[in-house]
Amino acid sequence: MGSFFQDVRYGLKLLRKSPGFTTVAILTLALGIGANTAIFSIVNSVLLRSLPFRDPDRLVKVSFENPGLGLHDVTFSVPELEDLSRSGVFDDVSSVFPTSTNVTGAKRPERLEATGVSPNYFSMLGVTPQVGRLFGPQDFALGFAEAAVISDGEWRRSFGADPGIVGRSIRLDNDLYTIVGVVPPGFRHPGKTIATDVEIWVTCGFSADPWPKPARSTRILLGAIARLKPDVTVQQAQAQLTTMASQLRNDFPTDYPAKSQWSIRIQPLQESLVGDIRPMLLVLMGTVILIILIASVNIANLLLARASGRQREMAVRLAVGASRVRMIRQMLTESLVLSLIAGIAGVVAAASALGFIVRFVPSKIPRLSEVNVDWRVLLFGLLISLVTGLVFGLAPAIQSAKADLVSAIREGAWGSGYGSKTSQLRGALIISELALAVVLLIGAGLLLRTFWFLLRENPGFNPDKVVAASIWLPNPNDPKTNPYPDIGVQEVFARELQRRMGTIPGIETAALTSDLPGSPPRNSRGLIIEDMPIESSQQVMAEIIRISPDYFKVIQCPLVRGRVFNEGDEAGKEMVVIVDETTAHRYWPDRDAIGRRLKLGQNPNLPWVTVVGIMKDIKHDGLDKDAIPHIYTSVYQQTGRILSVVLRTDLPPAQLESQIRDQIHAVDPELPVFGVKSMNEVLETSLAPRRFSAELVALFAALALLLASIGIYGLLAYMVGQRSHEIGIRMALGARRDHILKLILRQGIFLAGAGVSAGLVVAVATAPMIATLLYGVHPIDPVVFLSVALILLMVSFLASFIPAYRATKVDPIVALREG
């Protein structure tokens, strides 16, 4: 142990004696270790850390599937929820119904994210309140109970963290609720949400107003989570639920058509939350690991250069009896000291910047509020520091200890300090560094090319000069208190709202829609198409979007055939719809869709509607989603509580927001107005995850390119300095300066060519691993591969030219005298 501390003290002394080298090495390593620590903090919180609930490994998401129709996560009924409770594999089952609600009774009307759950929801998760109580058996109700639980954020924002909040009343969609408790600050709903974190929880039996009478075929529920019994594994539960689903299909054949292959699927709750974003985070983690490897190679080259200058010191130590193992340990200790100092700096920097970094992470990524530096992150920082120290310290340590005394003393006496073996090792390290940089640059190129394609993707309409704002009509539990109970009242509201929007100065045209392009689908339905066999109709699906007559005029979407809606397409008149090209081609491939009839649902009692127009496809579900069938209905003929106003104008959203709010409140002062933004901002929000991954990987790729160019420049510059005596002899014997230039450039280009070639081979093998993150780009994209190769070769040439040019300026007389 004493010799170890002696090595540490000696290493620190050497670092103090070389402040330039120490500063460069620590900054380079701290950058790599800090980037790794920051990204790992996110990966740790999102992917690795257990959910903050009681026995989280026993929590599962339950979903219902129709695999025969290619449908997943479909709605289910109250009887099917009860089937889960009787299955024998769960201790608890809770329905989960995400929604939004208009809240009054606080400081001002606002729209908040709410979730309807079963009374056992909080007890199943093992949550305790910070104020009041949570739901329990006393809150059971066929419809909605009067109790409400609010989030810590809503409690502080709207009620000033009033400790006497329990018993206060709020109105949700005009229904009176009593606040019974506040969840702890760190609690987040463990499931998908509509837009933001859940702020209000209500409990419901889903069996009375505003819900229809329970029936196995009345599938109104959106999701469920459950807790497995202690002695039941996920695999055992899945097998038992599969058997139960098969029995239900046999017992109720009319409710479960054979072709649908209706089934029940469970998966660990944590996996269900992070499954979609796992590939992106793993790619980012792989990227920063490549960065630290490239940084390590650079430091290894610096240490080799430093070690070659210490050859005489090493030779003397070996000559007086030091063992080679002892020399290797000394060199590795120096490397570890350096890496640990850099590691501490990197972890501190990552912890300080973590809050800033998280702001740029897309809000759709779950559990971002839990991102912090915990023991696992600190352990990772320590581990990567130790591994990095070993990686970049091992090569120079072994190389220094391998040399025999005679050659070490000879090379030290000659003054070159640059033996052939050292030269080969440093060249191999540079080739490795360039190969890693190629892999990283190609990954960044593929992601950037994907993002570029998406930005240029035709959304099917013109988003320029379009401003949108959203509202939600209330949907109270008691139908008698609903201010918008039927299509007649909603039609009057829609016409007046549209008229008032048109009176705002600077507005060219105003319209309404239930779904803005780029937003998640909200209303997918099965269809019945006239003259199509019932068996085939079971798999006919489309997303239903409500619009006003001028909607396509506002967003400038072209009509293919037929007509758009007019003011006469209203309640009491023949119901008409417009379909997009995908719907027309998919469901009427051999005939004209105009004039065809269908039912917007699979209830035979629904009225027939007639197709009157075909529009160009609009990328409603996101620019990276392939064509999906859409059917447009008139807001004057179909009810719904979700509406957005869309305005064609030259004015920015910030200038219009107050006027939009005033005009909406002039129609109904209780309606919260939210999401006032341009249509381009709406589309950009849908691309946020892809933008984040592409830009971050590109940033790291640029850093890798810089490190690689510094590496090859440093190697050649050091080589020129060490070979100045040889160069002087060559020039004294008649070598021309252009020959010297070519000699040095040839070595740099050889290293670059070897590194790029090796990198291309590795990239071909690894690029398909990010295929799920690409859109419109093949993993082996020749444009990206060729561009990266040319960029690396060009940068390598420039990095090689500077030391090569310096070599031509060597004065033969001075070089020979110094040699």
Image (cartoon, rainbow, N blue to C red):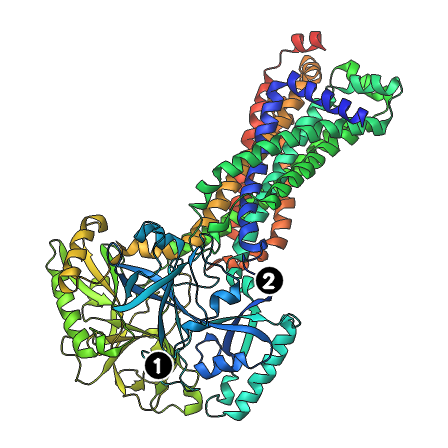
Q: Is residue 338 left or right of residue 616?
A: right
Where residue 154 appears, as percent x and y from the top left, is 35, 55
Q: Where on the picture, by quarter, is residue 538?
A: bottom left
- Above or below for 74 versus 772: below
Q: How many marks?
A: 2
Nearer to us in this view, 590 or 259: 259
**Residue at point 62% right, 75% down?**
237
For the C terminus, the quadrant is top right
**Res 125 label:** none
Check disc 1 and report the residue beneath it.
208
**Residue at point 41% right, 91% down?**
534
Residue 754 showing in the rendered view: no
Check disc 2 and report the residue beneath it.
55
- Above or below for 276 versus 807: below
Nearer to us in this view, 364 or 444: 364
Within-10-Å neighbours for mark 2: few <14, some 14–19, many 20+: some
Where residue 200 appears, as percent x and y from the top left, is 37, 62
Residue 494 showing in the rendered view: yes
Q: Secondary structure at mark 2?
A: loop
**Residue at point 67% right, 72% down?**
231
**Which callout, 2 or 1, points at the residue further toward the start of the chain?**
2
Amino acid tagged 1 = Ala
For the N terminus, the quadrant is top right
Amino acid tagged 2 = Asp
Nearer to us in this view, 157 or 433: 157
Within-10-Å neighbours for mark 1: few <14, some 14–19, many 20+: some
Where residue 122 appears, as percent x and y from the top left, is 48, 65
Where residue 409 appears, as percent x and y from the top left, is 82, 17
